[in-house]
Image (spheres, rainbow, N blue to C red):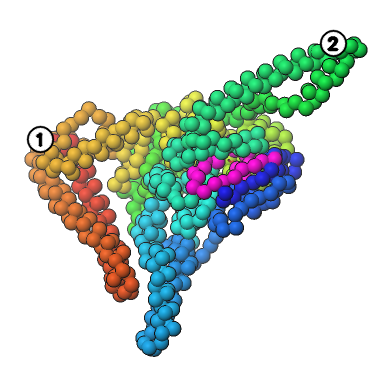
């Protein structure tokens, strides 16, 4: 066993979080820790790492077990170093050895005959080899890139990054340390889809145990082999993924319900017997023993203590005009990073838009431009009668931690009086004294509920929601889906939750080549369409001769406002010429990429060759070449994609 709890009880004041709970974490387990918001999952992890102490029972941990723990709240860790340096901090021992080898090398040059130094030197080299120390830079870069950092980001100071990105650096450092037990509290909250997928793959092959708190069904299904549910103050283990849990839970609930009903009947029967015969001398002894039996009986609990539902109900005050908002010729850049360039788009009444894509493409920035809280060039105009409300990504961090829940609502500029605010908070499951809780003690989901309540107070007919499902448990997430489906207004949202997007949006927006591309359809339709596109691309790479792609009856991604040439005829010739040119470039790029791939593989082999890695200079040179090949390859791949897109566009125009 790596770690665990033995008969642990824990409470906050009068509120019991865990009651006499036992749980053992074994090596090589991938466990999803689930439970409604506020049940105590984060608290449980804090108990496991010893940040909190139980009021009864013991915490168990084998002495040799190493543990890595990632908080749900963003950490206040700060440093002047670059993010690469922070992540490299995972290899403390190797970094120390690197310096030691360099120092001993210099000493050896001065005293070539000194056997002691020579021994120390070769020992250090050997240890470095055993620790796999020659590969740490490469490994670290790979992990950081997997989590969404670009090459240029790696040297930028940690301090410059927003909370979500800092969390990823700390996550990178932690997984590079490879502890025996990784405890991750909702790590996917601050990630985009590609990084979540990367993390999924990484953790599936992780050589250790992982306990991960998550409300993301898709993620849990792919990632975990065991589900542990914190429910009614106890932990319930399910040996399977999330789908298994759902089925099994239904069965267990049914069994428990039946056992409960049977026991109830039995108790009633026994009570009647006792009642009838207690007074009769001949049966008194039998009645006595029946009473004893009942006293000793282990009472089965009734199943579902009906879970109170959040009553999310977005109200609309006024109906707006047909067009809600237009973006015309909008450009935005951060220094050298271009987000959008002369982009145009329109949001109409009835639109339920999901804005998706990798981080760094500027989804939140675009949302902020629409909301009018970000500077930009170009025009953004509201339509008639539009009343908007904006739920921002860092809304949770923006809450005043020292205020109470009620104060926070009072301070948001709403016209409502205290009673009305209390009623609204009640709909979000803050009843009675809960409204006097300080924000700082709230769980992640509870904070999200306060922030959502603030959005709802407005009765807007157009919502801009940035990551609204972060921290919400699946039940609350379903209620939000339901509320958004019933909502009479329109919305645009940014989310990385695939399930949520597929259930809410009727349009997908993606920022591509600094333009806003629109897909009219649901997320599921969009994914199918993307897959078909990828298949086409593959046939193109398999056999260059099949490059002329047949047109299919598929919905196409197109600029949100199309700019097609009005007269096709003269353009045709030009088009053909351009198409041929692009096809030639495409072929050349393919060849270059294949060649470079081979070179990169050879270099990688070289890095693991002892004659290279034990020679500092040779190793450095090979390492630099390897890194350069990687950079060149990613730039070529980017060009390759761009040329492919161009070909597609040109073929459409023919
Ligand atoms: N210091 C504290 N004092 C009083 N109550 C607290 C304190 N810390 C946490 N709580 C309460 O204990 C409950 C459990 O909190 P915890 O953060 O462990 O929940 P959780 O299961 O992680 O929820 P979520 O899914 O929302 O992250 C919450 O209702 C929270 O408000
Ligand atoms: Mg939590």
Mark 2 or 1: in front is 2
Picture coordinates of residue 273 (x, y %)? 81, 13
Q: Quadrant of the C terminus?
A: top left
Q: Residues within 10 Å of mark 1 (few under 14, many from 20)?
A: few
Residue 569 - label: 1
Q: Residues within 10 Å of mark 2 (few under 14, many from 20)?
A: few
Q: Secondary structure at mark 1?
A: helix
Residue 562: in magenta span: no
| Residue at the spot 39% in from the left edge and 67% down from the top edge | 129
Residue 276 - label: 2
Return the residue nearer the eye: 476 or 115: 115
Q: Is mark 2 within 8 Å of ligand 1?
A: no
Q: Secondary structure at mark 2?
A: helix
| Residue at the spot 43% in from the left edge and 39% down from the top edge | 222
Instruction: Indicate which disc, 2 or 1, sits on the residue closer to the N terminus.
Output: 2
Q: Is residue 86 found left or right of 293 in the rendered image?
A: left
Q: Quadrant of residue 260?
A: top right
Q: Quadrant of residue 291?
A: top right
Picture coordinates of residue 63 (x, y %)? 60, 58
Residue 37: in magenta span: yes
From this view, report whether residue 97 is shown above or below residue 549.
below
From this view, report whether residue 427 is shown above or below residue 222.
above
Task: Specify the segment rendered in magenta.
Answer: 20-44
Q: Quadrant of residue 380?
A: top left
Return the residue nearer the eye: 141 or 457: 141
| Residue at the spot 82% in from the left edge and 24% down from the top edge | 292
| Residue at the spot 51% in from the left edge and 54% down from the top edge | 180
Q: Is residue 477 found left or right of 642 in the rendered image?
A: right
Q: Is residue 500 found left or right of 405 in the rendered image?
A: left
């Amino acid at each position: 066993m790596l770690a665990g709890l033995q008969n642990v009880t824990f409470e906050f004041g009068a509120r019991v979080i865990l009651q006499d709970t036992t749980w053992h974490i074994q090596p090589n387990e991938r466990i999803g820790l689930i439970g409604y918001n506020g049940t105590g999952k984060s608290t449980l992890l804090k108990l496991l790492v010893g940040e909190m102490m139980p009021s009864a029972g013991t915490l168990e941990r084998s002495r040799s077990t190493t543990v890595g723990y990632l908080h749900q709240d963003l950490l206040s860790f700060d440093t002047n170093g670059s993010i690469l340096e922070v992540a490299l901090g995972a290899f403390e021992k190797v970094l120390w050895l690197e310096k030691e080898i360099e120092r001993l090398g210099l000493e050896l040059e001065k005293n070539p005959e000194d056997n002691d130094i020579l021994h120390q030197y070769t020992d250090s080299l050997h240890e470095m080899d055993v620790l796999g120390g020659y590969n740490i830079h490469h490994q670290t870069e790979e992990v950081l890139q997997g989590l969404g950092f670009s090459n240029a980001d790696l040297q930028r100071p940690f301090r410059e990054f927003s909370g979500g990105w800092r969390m990823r650096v700390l996550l990178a450092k932690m997984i590079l340390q490879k502890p025996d037990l990784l405890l991750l509290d909702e790590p996917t909250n601050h990630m985009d889809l590609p990084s979540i997928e990367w993390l999924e793959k990484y953790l599936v092959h992780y050589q250790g145990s992982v306990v991960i708190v998550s409300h993301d069904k898709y993620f849990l299904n792919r990632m975990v082999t065991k589900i542990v549910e914190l429910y009614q103050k106890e932990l319930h283990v399910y040996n399977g993924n999330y789908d298994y849990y759902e089925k099994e839970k239904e069965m267990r609930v049914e069994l428990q319900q039946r056992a409960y009903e049977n026991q109830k009947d039995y108790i009633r029967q026994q009570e009647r017997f006792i009642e009838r015969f207690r007074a009769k001398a001949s049966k008194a002894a039998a009645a006595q023993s029946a009473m004893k039996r009942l006293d000793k009986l282990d009472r089965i609990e009734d199943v579902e203590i009906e879970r109170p539902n959040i009553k999310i109900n977005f109200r609309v005050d006024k109906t707006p005009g047909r067009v809600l908002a237009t973006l015309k010729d909008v450009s935005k850049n951060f220094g050298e990073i271009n987000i959008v360039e002369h982009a145009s788009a329109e949001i109409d009444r009835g639109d339920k838009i999901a804005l998706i894509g990798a981080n760094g493409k500027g989804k939140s920035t675009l949302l902020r431009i629409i909301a009018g809280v970000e500077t930009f060039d170009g025009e953004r105009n509201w339509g008639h009668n539009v009343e908007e409300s904006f739920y921002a990504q860092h809304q949770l961090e923006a809450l005043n931690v020292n205020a109470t829940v009620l104060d926070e609502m009072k301070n948001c500029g709403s016209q409502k009086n205290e009673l009305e605010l209390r009623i609204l908070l009640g709909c979000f499951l803050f009843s009675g004294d809960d409204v006097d809780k300080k924000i700082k003690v709230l769980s992640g989901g509870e904070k999200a509920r306060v922030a959502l309540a603030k959005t709802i107070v407005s009765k807007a007919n157009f919502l801009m929601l940035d990551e609204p499902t972060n921290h919400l448990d699946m039940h609350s997430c379903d209620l939000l889906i339901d509320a958004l489906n019933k909502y009479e207004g329109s919305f645009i949202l940014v989310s990385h939750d695939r399930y949520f997007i597929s259930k809410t949006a009727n349009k997908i927006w993606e920022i591509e080549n600094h333009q806003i591309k629109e897909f009219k359809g649901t997320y599921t339709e969009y994914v199918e369409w993307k897959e078909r596109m990828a298949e086409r691309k593959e046939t193109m790479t398999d056999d260059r001769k099949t490059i002329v792609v047949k047109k299919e009856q598929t919905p196409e991604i197109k600029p949100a406002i199309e700019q097609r040439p009005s007269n096709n005829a003269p353009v045709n010739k030009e088009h053909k010429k351009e198409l041929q040119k692009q096809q030639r470039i495409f072929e050349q790029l393919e060849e270059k990429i294949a060649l470079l791939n081979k070179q990169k593989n050879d270099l990688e082999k070289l890095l693991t060759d002892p004659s290279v890695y034990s020679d500092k200079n040779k190793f450095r040179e090979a390492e630099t070449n390897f890194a350069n090949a990687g950079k060149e390859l990613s730039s070529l791949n980017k060009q390759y994609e761009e040329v492919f897109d161009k070909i597609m566009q040109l073929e459409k125009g023919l």
